[in-house]
Amino acid sequence: MTTLQSLMTRVHRHMPAPLRAAPLVVGLEAMRRAGRLEPPAALDGRTFSLTVDDMGLEVRFHCANGRFLPGPFDGRETDLTLRAAALSYLQLIGGDADTDTLFFQRRLSIRGDTALGLEVKYWLDAAPRPAWLESLAQRLSLLFPQPRGA
């Protein structure tokens, strides 16, 4: 783990859960409001957890009335949990890898409602990625070197 990863992990663990969810939720909402990311109806009323395994980070959010919102933070299981290393998420965001590739290489795991998981998979694979987001993901990937032998 790099110094930056270690620092991010320590800070994240001391933040309240709503604050941890804020950057992701604000980003998703900004993309939605800009018309670049429209959640399918199947996501409405459902809860999600994204876990970044190599950093021990977890972010919870839900979709309600087509909007992305933080939570739930009551300890219950979410409807769908995605788990991957930071680099795998960045490759997915940047379009350098798709969900099938990451899943079959065991770099992405999905737990929970299978039908919802498929809906999210199709949605993520079909979502347009603006050039600036691809560029940002590629630059951030430099902070997370790929493990040897991977």
Image (tube, rainbow, N blue to C red):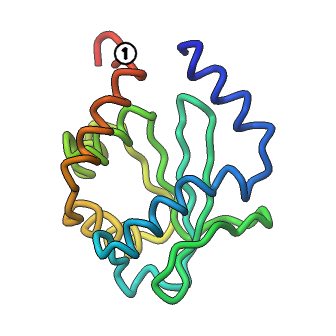
Q: Which quadrant would residue 90 be assigned to in this image?
A: top left
Question: Residue at point 30% right, 76% down?
Answer: 35
Q: Residues within 10 Å of mark 1 (few under 14, many from 20)?
A: few
In the picture, measured across the screen, residue 121 lies left or right of residue 80, that is left
Position of residue 112 measured from the top left corner of the image (x, y, whole percent): 51, 65
Quadrant of residue 69 within the rendered picture: bottom right
Q: Indicate the amino acid at tag 1.
A: Pro
Q: Is residue 86 left or right of residue 79?
A: left
Residue 24: x %, y % from top left: 52, 55
Find residue 88 and report its horizontal and vertical position in percent: 35, 37
Element type at mark 1: loop
Vertically, is 68 above or below 57? below
Where in the figure is residue 23, as x and y percent of width and height? Answer: 57, 53
Q: Above or below — where is 139 with respect to 113?
A: above
Instruction: Give the quarter of the figure containing the C terminus.
Output: top left
- Which of 106 and 39 lies nearest the eye of the viewer? 39
